[in-house]
Amino acid sequence: MQLMINNISKGFGDKEVLHNVSFTVTSGRAMGFLGRNGAGKSTTIRCLMDVFRPDSGDFLLDGRPFKPRSLKIGYLPEERGMYQKNEVLAQLMYFARLRGASKADALKSANHWVDYFGLGDYKKKKLEVLSKGNQQKIQIAQSFLNEPDILILDEPFSGLDPVNARVFQDAISDFVKEGRLVIFSSHQMSYVEDVCDDVTLIHEGRILLSGDLDKIRREEGQNKLFLSVLSADETWERDLKAAFPTLLISPADDGLILDTQGTLTQGEIMAWLGRKGLVLRRFGLYEPSLNDIFIQKAGD
Amino acid sequence: MRDFFTVFHYELKTQLTKKTAIVTTVILMVVMLLITSLPRIISLFDSGEVTQEGLAFIQDAGYVLPGGETEALLVSLLGEEPQRFDSRDALVQALQENGLEVGFVIQANLDYEAIYMDRSLEDSQDQQMAALLSQIKRQQLITRMGLTPGDFAAIEAAQVQGETTVLGRNSINNYAISFILMLTVYMMVLLYGNSVSTIIAREKDSRTMEILITSTRPSSLILGKVAAAGLSAVVQFGAVLLAAVAGYQLNRHLYPEIITAMLSGTLTASYVWSYLFFSFFGFILYLFLYAALGSTVSKMEDLGSATALVQFLFILGYFLATLAANMPSGTLAVISSIIPFTSIMVMPLRSAVITVPWGELILAGALMLLFVVFFAFLSIKIYRWGSLNYGNKTKLSRIVREALRSR
């Protein structure tokens, strides 16, 4: 399956929130949808789920109009909520039935996912008696009901402790391996790096980059080197700049990022460092983390 | 349709298995059984003693009497020796200090003054005294005219035989039962209307709505919820009504004849149809209104002010119905029995007390059906609108405009 988000624009009153948002999600490859607060992630997802109607653009699944209610979709909204005063299993069955499951399948699926998240003892309890963390797991469980073909999760990791986040990550990874289509938004870059094959970065309603995460990393690291030096005096950095005027130097954690702009080779710089007699902690190709890319692209 | 039944089944089960709903129903059933068994309960405590004739039942009374023949006549009619006082002041003092309830200062010409220490709503000793003194005065006048007490008794006892035939509705008999049934509808609308709006507002407040509307169509959700609320109301009130009927049937022979006549007089087929039709569809109409208004609020605490308008509309219908009972053919009654928001109560009440022309019944029925369909459509639109709008309060007129303009 291939889901195309195609030139989506959406405004509220005078404020334009999405500007021709376009990217593609492919089944079997988890898509991480990244952006700062208010960047337009939830609005895009709500448009996709037909909660909001976009002002222009369309959503296509394998070339056909995407109709969420006619597909097997699991959805976890950003602002999550369920019936506080109702029993956990009963309301999960209700949601499963609303998404087309038979009574038997709904029961089976609800039981499976409650057990999967380790909440088997709470099936007959009202949701309000569960802790906040456990309520969150039940809300996540509802998105997995009926083993959906498409999983759309808005900020699923927020509020989860590392152990539960790992359980959830495993569930997502299993879905991806089974060839399902998965898209989720997040602020937590480490989770995205662990789970996602593709990422899309949105900033102020515009897509800044989208595609294969490794490829993006390589492209963002192209012509760049990472240098970390031990016990050096303060003048070597100035000397380096003087020796290579075309070299762009920017600080990074525990070192410097050197942008050669394609005018220098790694060997030329290495030879200069050798001549200066500097002790190197690390010198090599720069591979930016997703966090680095995010801050670089979406930072002020 | 499948989703409608899923929503309907879930909401119905949730409503009927609520502990509060079960306890309330059981309590109401017991109360209704007790009320309808009142004649039996009263008979258990009834000693069978006949109330004493005359004014002996005016207890704790004091008198300033005029003396002479009038006083002798009064004493004989009071049935027991009265507490006499010499003056009005002495009587007032006794009322203030000795626990007397009422005092009478009676003049020779039978004019009187009744003096109460405190007077409750039930106290009517002054009227009883007035009746007695008037009777004495009439008797004195007749004697002066040369008639005997026997003549007076014959005049007093003179009666004519009469028979009344009512071809249409008998308002006197029908009013009570139709009023009781109207109150049932009144309670159902207020209780279950508020229940529907609370359910929807809570879904919105807890953000469950977004999961629901991405899982199924808003129409299935609204129709399912309204149908479930409607049926649970019928089940709950049906149980209470059943308890009332059972209590009445068990104690029927102990009821005064006038009440059994009242209860059996109204239930003609045309009244029952009018009651069932307008109450049922009016109830559904109000449930849709409450559902729509529940969708417009973002926080539970705003629900009261959001539903105030429809509550006002409904209570207005109730007052118009009480007015219509007195003037069932008046212009106001006719108009309010045709407009659906008020016809829910006015039309059944009019049908109980007069024969409503067919034209008015058909027009009111058609309008009611149209309004139900339109407001069902509107409530679905507003529900959908509400799922997208949180935060700022919006005017109802703007909500309706935006909701109708949306998909």
Image: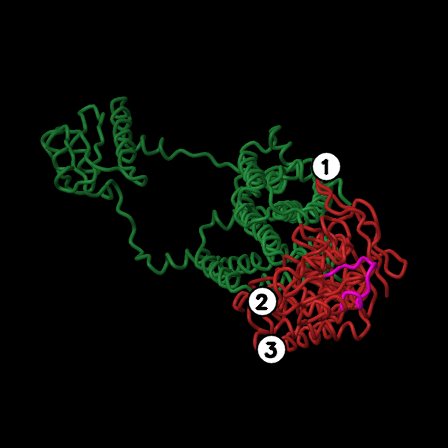
Badge 3 element: helix
Looking at the image, tell me whether mark 3 or mark 2 is earlier in sequence order: 3
Residue nearest the observer in this picture, B277 or B88: B277
Percent of width and height locating residue B307? 57, 43
Q: Is residue A241 above or below residue B373?
A: below
Point out the image quarter for the N terminus of chain B.
Answer: bottom right
The hue in which chain A appears in the rendered picture of the protein: red
Percent of width and height locating residue A188? 65, 63
Residue reaching furthest to the right: A63
To which residue does mark 1 refer?
Answer: B363
Give, as a three-letter code, the residue at label 3. Answer: Gly
Q: Is residue A240 magenta?
A: no
The hue in which chain B appears in the rendered picture of the protein: green
Residue located 50% across and 61% down the image: B20
Quadrant of the rendered image containing residue B70? top left
> Is residue B272 at least partly visible in the picture?
no
Residue located 23% across and 41% down the image: B58
Residue A120's mark?
3
Q: Dots 3 and 2: beta carbons under 8 Å?
A: no
To which residue does mark 2 refer?
Answer: A135
Residue nearest the observer in this picture, A230 or B176: A230
Badge 2 element: helix
Disc 2 sits on a residue from what chain?
A: A
